[in-house]
Image (tube, rainbow, N blue to C red):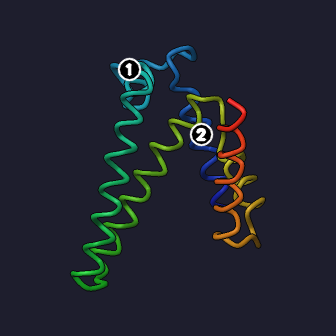
Amino acid sequence: MSSNDTLQRLAQIIEGRKPAQGGDPDKSYVARLLHKGPDAFLKKIGEEATETVMAAKDLDYGGATAELKAKLVGEVADLWFHSLIALVHYGLSPADVMVELERREGTSGIEEKALRKALHREVQEKT
């Protein structure tokens, strides 16, 4: 079983928690976040991103102990989970992210970032 399968299964569970699919905000954390709308789950993504950074910094300054490594893994899992909620809300899936990562594979990060900036400038100039 691949990691992509796990992410896809989780996305399907999240899909089933949408209020339109009968998700009950009183019984499901995911349904509650989706019911509250984007501000709720986007705030959680920000919180989890911050906690991920803090856990990584703890590793930098506290030593690479098993406990601190597990904390970082847990925070990244929380970040990915809440990001999946956003993807599902916006009609996207983990497969969409995988396609983008595969597109970037073998491309220099510096070159890819420069291309994105150039495209952004081009769009701005047209508007």
Residue type at mark 1: give it: Lys
Residue type at mark 2: give it: Ala
Residue picked out by circle 2: 11
The x and y percentages for residue 47 are 31, 46
The x and y percentages for residue 57 are 28, 72
Question: Quarter holding the N terminus?
Answer: bottom right
Please identify the residue farthest to the front as the structure is shown: 125
**Residue depicted at x 25% and y 73%:** 58
Q: Secondary structure at mark 1?
A: helix
- Considering only order in the chain, which callout, 1 or 2, is on the residue closer to the N terminus? 2
The one nearer the camera, 75 or 53, is 53
Residue picked out by circle 1: 36
**Residue depicted at x 60% and y 50%:** 7
| Contact? badges 2 and 1 (CB < 8 Å) | no
The one nearer the camera, 58 or 13, is 58
The x and y percentages for residue 90 are 60, 29
**Residue depicted at x 66% and y 46%:** 121
